[in-house]
Amino acid sequence: MPSLINRMLFIFILMFVLTTLRFLFAGRARNNKIEKPSFIQRFALGVQVAITGLMAFIVFMGLILKDSEMIIVGSVIVIIFGAILFGTRRKFKRFYRENEEYFYLDQQYVVD
């Protein structure tokens, strides 16, 4: 029984620490009442772009080497990552302006 209590206590402490870190670092940046994606969100978008680009390079290398397996597998992965990247960019390219009562979409946010 003490083993179960220790595990539950460990999970509780871990959840508390992760939730606190999320509130500290994952919040959206506000500048003059304009909400923009945070550094972590922009960094994750950059990582997605890099992974998609790397997989596209692997498909290109498969074309040069004439390896059909590499081309097929790489193409499927590029299509999946491209769809995920497209959806993510559409979500985080917008920012919202705060009114007295609500947030409303102001314009597109340009990712650096």
Image (tube, rainbow, N blue to C red):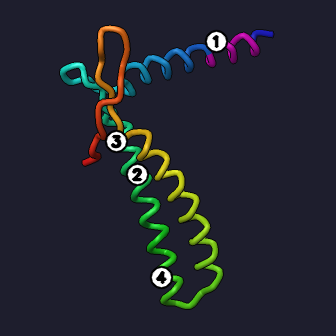
Q: Which residue is mark 2?
A: 47
Count of labels shown?
4
Q: Which residue is mark 3?
A: 42
Query: Which residue occupies 63% across, 85% down?
Result: 68
Please name which of the two marks, 1 or 3, marks the residue nearer to the observer. 3
- Dot 3 and dot 2 residues touching (CB under 8 Å): no
Q: What element does badge 1 sit on? A: helix
Query: Which residue occupies 42% across, 22% down?
Result: 21
User: Looking at the picture, does residue 97 appear above or below residue 51?
Assistant: above
Label 3, label 2: how far apart the Cα atoms are: 9 Å
Query: Which residue occupies 64% across, 12% down?
Result: 9
**Which residues make up the magenta segment?**
3-11
The kind of residue on which mark 1 rests is Leu
> Foreground residue, 107 or 58?
107
Label 1, label 3: how far apart the Cα atoms are: 34 Å
User: Looking at the picture, does residue 47 appear above or below residue 30?
Assistant: below
The kind of residue on which mark 2 rests is Val
Q: What element does badge 4 sit on? A: helix
- Of the 4 image quadrants, the one containing the N terminus is top right
